[in-house]
Every structure is written in structure tokens, then in C-alpha cells.
Amino acid sequence: MSRPDGRANDELRPVTFVNDFVASATGSVLIEQGKTRVICTASVVDNVPRWMAGQGRGWVTAEYGMLPASTGERKQRDVSKGRPDGRTVEIQRLIGRSLRGVIDFEALGERTIWVDCDVLQADAGTRCASITGGYVALARAFDRLIEKGDLSASPLSQSIAAISCGIVEGEPRLDLDYSEDSTAEVDANVVMTGDGGLVEVQATAERTPLSKAHLDDLLALAGAGIESLKAAQAEAIAAVGQTQAS
């Protein structure tokens, strides 16, 4: 079966990074993955949560949000509801713990990095794009701190990225768009480090149970996709302006 946009089953949507998208942030990037667009910023605060004070270690945390017009129907702002919804809380926790998995907190020192991910346009895969773009924003923030002499080396131990995949019409497919995600028999999100270590696998079978063979297929697809994202991230971190994954 052909995909809605004509891609092969193992093909990513076009991925573009626009660096320094928010000039006032220590590090920032706009990640465009197909029609999904997310602004990721990394902001430095020269203190840590009270429970970490005096330990000589830093902290990284994340927040996630969607603009009201980012989906087909207007999404009510969390502030107007008085609290974030459960999905928002789940996603920002996922982003934070994913990024913390590749940080040397002692090398960071007693400072906090806030990684904010704001979805401009959603066509599925927003949490994965937030992790992939959040890493780039974080790396560029650390490079700026090194340039200023605030850090002697980057606290990042390796890269991290995330990708969606799923079973659609009986076929394993990589990087689902909304039309595929909304009809998938199985949808999954995979977070993986640059050396291939799994940080998180979220997989849900909507109608039929997920077989071990199909899970292996999805993990293989995700691993190949993340290798491509890893190369694009490295290029974006080193570049000035806009870069596109090959």
C-alpha cells in the first residue's frame, strides 16, 4: 500500500533545522518534520531547585505546549484552564527525562537549563520532534556557554533523538503523519541515544495485539531513522542558519 505522501515505509519526512530561531534564548532551533513544526529553546538559570542546592550538580527540565491554532480545531490554552492537561504533563516529562539521560550534571555545575518546546503546527510526532530539536537547542546553548567561558566542556555525553513508527494497513512504517497515526493498528514512539541505547519505547496496539516480530520491525525502523536524525542534528549544531536532513 502506498503512503499518503508517497514515501517509502522506511523513509523519514523531510527534516529541517533553523538555528537561532529565537535570538534571546541561549540556544534555539525551529525543527520542521514534514508539516510538524516545533520551536525548541534552551534557557540558562544560574541556580538549581532547592533540593539540589549545594551539591555542585545542575539540572535540566522541560516544558511543552501547543499553540491554539496548531491543530485543525482550536486548542484551548492551558492557562485558561488553570492547569496543563494530562497529555501535556506526560509529554514534557518524557522530554525532560530523555534529555537528562545524556547530561553530566556535575560538568553542568549548579545551573538549570529549561528546554521549552512550543508546537506551531502539529501533523503527528510532536513529542518526538521536541526531543530531537530540544537536544539541538541544548547543545547550541552549551556551545554558547563554552564560548563565554562559563563551561570548560559540553556536559552532553552523547546525542539523543526520537521518532514515531507504527503498523498501518498491516505494514510497519516510519515517521507517521497524522493521517497514518489516526488510523494505525499500532503506534509507537522510540527514544534512542546516539550509541543505539533505548531510553524509552511507548507502543500502543489499538485493535490487534502487537506481535514480537512486528515490535522488532518497528525498533529496526526507528533505529535507522534515528541514525539519520543523529547526522542531521550534528550538522545543525555545527552550522549557522538552516540545515536539512539528507
Image: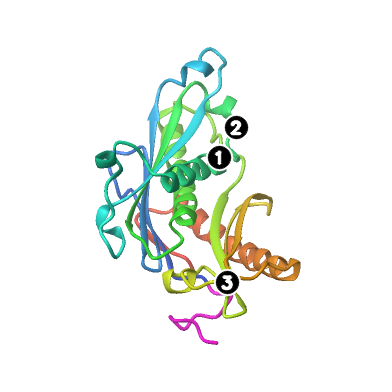
Q: Is residue 244 left or right of residue 109?
A: left
Which residue is disc 3 drawn over?
Answer: 185
Please, which residue is most extreme toward the top here?
54
- Quarter of the image for the N terminus: give it: bottom right
Mark 2 vs mark 1: which is more N-terminal?
1
Q: Is residue 59 left or right of residue 118?
A: right
Q: Is residue 125 above or below residue 180?
A: above
Three-letter amino acid code of the residue under disc 1: Arg
**Crowd tier of the residue under label 2, counting other residues whose Cα lies within 10 Å: few below 14, some 14–19, many 20 or above:** some
Q: Is residue 175 above or below residue 139?
A: below
In what element is the residue under mark 3? loop
Which residue is disc 1 drawn over?
Answer: 97
Seen at 46% across and 61% down, the residue is: 125
Which residue is disc 2 drawn over?
Answer: 104
**Crowd tier of the residue under label 3, counting other residues whose Cα lies within 10 Å: few below 14, some 14–19, many 20 or above:** many
Seen at 51% across and 86% down, the residue is: 2
Three-letter amino acid code of the residue under disc 3: Glu
In what element is the residue under mark 2? loop
Seen at 46% across and 84% down, the residue is: 6
- Residue 37 image-quadrant placement: bottom left
Q: Which mark is residue 79?
A: none
Point out residue 114 in the picture as x, y percentages from the top left corner. Answer: 41, 34
Spatial CA span between label 3 and label 1: 28 Å
Is residue 209 found inside the magenta-colored segment of the image? Answer: no
Give the residues drawn in magenta, as a range.
1-11
The label nearer to you, 3 versus 2, is 3
Q: Nearer the viewer, residue 151 or 57?
A: 57
Spatial CA span between label 2 and label 1: 13 Å
Q: Is residue 144 left or right of residue 9?
A: left
